[in-house]
Amino acid sequence: MIRRMKVKMSTRKDDYSDDLKEIDEWLTKLFLDPLTSQLDETTFHIEIFETCEDYIIEAILAKYHQKDISVYLNEKKIYIYADGLKKKEKKSRVIEFPFLVTERKVSAYFNDGILEIFISKERWKCGKNRRVPIL
């Protein structure tokens, strides 16, 4: 399920600001896609939030430990892998954004079975496919 948080958005138009209409269409499409609900049931549940500064992905991974989870960025996609001890416990999700996530500052935190991934709305200079450390 994807939830949009009501936040006051800045009216300032900077070089790094996203096309808000494109982001809104992306969230609506993702929210209405029946595959999203199916993946929530068959892999693990995710929610996407938006604040003034970040997009936030929350993944419910209660059956896993921090060492079992990996987050990777590849162009417009964020890959979440959760590897349990049994083959049936290995799960993954891919979330595609309408912009290059590799050009954003991305951080991940795992606490009490919930993985939170913060994707900055501000562009960052890295621009490389990479693994995101989980704190």
Image (cartoon, grey):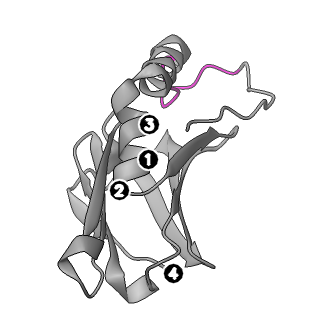
Does residue 76 appear anywhere in the picture?
A: yes
Q: Nearer the viewer, residue 22 or 80?
A: 80
Say which quadrant the N terminus sits in.
top right
Which label is found at residue 37?
A: 3
Write down the residue under mark 1. Answer: 40
> Would you place residue 129 above or below residue 19 in this image?
below
**Pointers 1 and 2 in contact (C-beta within 8 Å):** yes
Q: Disc 2 residue type?
A: Thr
Q: Nearer the viewer, residue 95 or 122?
A: 95
Mark 3 / mark 2, whichever is N-terminal: 3
CA gap between label 1 and label 2 equals 6 Å
CA gap between label 3 and label 4 equals 28 Å
Q: Disc 3 residue type?
A: Ser
> Would you place residue 94 above or below residue 52 in this image?
below
Residue 6, position as x, y percentages in the image: 78, 30
Which label is found at residue 43?
A: 2
Which SS class for mark 4?
A: loop
**Pointers 3 and 1 in contact (C-beta within 8 Å):** yes
- For label 3, the crowd category at 10 Å Cα-Cα, with few meaning under 14, some 14 to 19 and many 20 or more, is some
CA gap between label 3 and label 2 equals 10 Å
Which SS class for mark 1?
A: helix
Which label is found at residue 113?
A: none
Q: Which residues are magenta?
A: 12-19
Q: Residue at x 28, y 64 (%)?
A: 91
- For label 1, the crowd category at 10 Å Cα-Cα, with few meaning under 14, some 14 to 19 and many 20 or more, is some
CA gap between label 4 and label 1 equals 24 Å
**Pointers 3 and 2 in contact (C-beta within 8 Å):** no
Residue 27, position as x, y percentages in the image: 50, 25
Q: Nearer the viewer, mark 4 or mark 1?
A: 1
Q: Disc 1 residue type?
A: Asp
> Would you place residue 87 above or below residue 22 in this image?
below
